[in-house]
Amino acid sequence: MSEAYVIDEAAEKREITRRYRNLLRSHKRSKNPAERKRIRKAFDVAVEAHREDRRKTGEPYIYHPIEVAHIVSAEMGLDTTSVVAALLHDTVEDTYITLEDIENLFGEKERYLIDGLTKIKGVLDHSTSMQAENFRKMILTLSDDVRVILIKLADRLHNMRTLDSMPRPKQLKIANETSYMYAPLAHRLGLYSIKTELEDLSLKYTEPEAYAEIVEKLKRSKSGRTRFINRFSKPIIDDLQKAGIQFELKGRTKSVYSIWKKMKTKHIPFEEVYDVFAIRIIMDTDSLEQEKNLCWNAYSMVTDHYKPNTERLRDWISNPKSNGYESLHATVMSDSGKWVEVQIRSRRMDEIAEKGLAAHWKYKDGGAGKQNSLDMWLHQVREMLENPDADAINFIDDFKLNLFAEEIFVFTPTGDLKKLPVNATALDFAFEIHSQVGARTIGAKVNARLVPLSHQLKSGDQVEIITSKNQRPTEDWLNFVITGKAKSKIRESLKEKKKEVAQDGKEILKRKFKSLKADYISANVELLRKHYKTETTTDFYFEIATGKIDLKKLKGYEISNGRLTFPKKKVDAPKPKEKKSPAALPGKSDTLILNDNNTNMEYKLAPCCSPIPGDDIFGFVTIGDGIKIHRTNCPNAVQMLSKFDYRVIKAKWSSQKEKESLAFIRFEGIDDIGLVHTITDTISRQLSVNMKSISFESHDGIFTGDISLYIHNTTHLNKLIREMENIKGVTRVMRVEKPNE
Ligand code: MN
């Protein structure tokens, strides 16, 4: 809790009413008296049920469901049933209200939605390491009624907007989970503005300093950007007006998160990322038929004034993305030589891009083909879920893969268009046609030329698959497919094959038991399986069949009355498994203190982010290599914190005097004789910092250098970076995670 919260019941009552009115105003259908009544009823039930509950801030709990309902209505444009469900979403889990009550008071549909939401909440709250599984359950529900997932997203969004009052470890967990699971989901559903906000908010908590810096710089550069955009847009606006077109022109702002990501991946400063400008032209049309023409019309007006880069023309109107996104993107050269991206679209396309799914529903009757891509996606999700053996972690990886991939378009021999992610291979295509075709593939012809299964496809390729009924998938196939569908089908088939082989192992074991005069009973089989430390009975049989387990070498057993036993001391204790329960982890409940002489835990600093004292850190229990210390902003942190959080332990630096740690700095400057000398002199002589290595490279008058040096802590490092920035000729200095290879 940040500040003490003083309860003033009268003021709270006014605030609840204000928020409720705001909700009604946002919901157009509340003008209908019957629908307004349903919302009022849900509101009354929720207020009464949460009467005693308060949020972490101290505020009345009811603020939360009202705000979630407001998001559902105002930002997603969903129906009254969704607003009702959002108001009640926490009642069944947290209060005396039951699902039967919901059904009696409201109806079957409301019961169904709240049941789904309660289940998701239940699993999320009461588990530490099952996020992937929860996610799968969420998707399962989604395939029945997508409103469940939309309300869940609204719930998460409001929790992210009010994350301030949570303790720091909880903030990190929720923020990571958000960027790992919820933001991609919002993206896939086409909810761009919500996706962007979720990403920005999660950055605010995982990288507070970087976030604040970008926000500040955006604020400062605003007027300059506005001036540039106004000058650039002027001739386009004139032309559009002359043609009598109704339109709106917006200067697009990049999100904080997308700026940060570009700075990080390309190692470039804010100014360089922000040098990319974009505007959006949104036009009002009377009919769907006009849209395409009008967009190309506007394109021609833009290119009358500015020269286009034809390689960067994207026509998402003729070929919409599978989440329904439609728009025409062109990149043109401004008079001052800057590239500007121009997005051209109709009002309908814009609404779909911003509100996603909800807008899809709105336009469902108008755009026949548009709904199809969404249905196709839901169909794909369902297909993956129907594979009962796919384990949750694999699932989320496969799913994520699909979420982030860009698409390519390829053709079947009969000219049908298929969408695949970028880098998809001929084998992916075969599985896309049909899982039976995929499993029997021996080769492919791309544009009439024979290619291997691993051949990567490009947009526009025509692909013919060659099959043989004797063909079976093999383990290495997993290396040349990238689609979730192909992966899960191949795994399924490998599992089948393993089961077949395991049958042979079972027979071998039966014969062995016979010769030993041991009974073939599950107690005996289990005992042996554990003796050989195999995970499952199928694995056990499989290893016997393949000879990895040699029963001839079995020693140290006794048999009496058909029962097999191993005298105690000869049996090795089973090796610890990878997934320890949290309680079994060393000092899970404690914080690991680094650089402390009293610490009895072994740890290593992770080479992927090279933490130094002062960095925000956590410990991660690795398999077979002890505890590794990572920075919370390590490139791998999102994965570790969200997928394996049961292996995460708290860690912090001790307040004792730090030993020196190795840190890495990269810098750029204008090539100048003597500058290298000035830099090394500043570092080693004036600042008395020891350098471990230093390397320079010079190219077209610009040099870049990498230094590894020993420093005490982050304060020390930041001071050094500031000093270096002050050296004349140095344009940029930054800390990097790893030495330059
Ligand atoms: Mn909630």
Image (spheres, helix red, strand yellow):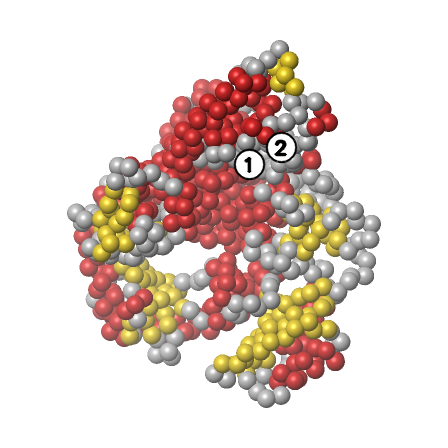
- Is label 1 within 8 A of ligand 1 (CB to nearest ligand atom)? no
Residue 252 to residue 668: above or below: above
Residue 545: horizontal and vertical position, in percent? 47, 30
Residue type for callout 1? Met
Residue 729: horizontal and vertical position, in percent? 58, 83
First along the sequence among labels 2 and 1: 2
Question: Which sits in the foreground, 187 or 686?
Answer: 686
Residue 40: horizontal and vertical position, in percent? 46, 31
The numbered dot on residue 130 is 1
Residues at marks 2 and 1 touching, judged by CB atoms closer than 8 Å: no
Q: Is residue 570 left or right of residue 240?
A: right
The numbered dot on residue 53 is 2
Task: Assign the C terminus to one quadrant of the image.
Answer: bottom right
Q: Is residue 194 left or right of residue 586?
A: left
Where residue 522 sits, quadrant-wise, is top right
Q: Is residue 397 left or right of residue 690?
A: left
Does dot 2 land on a helix, a strand or a loop?
A: loop
Q: What is the distance, in whole Å, between disc 2 and disc 1 at their CAs? A: 27 Å
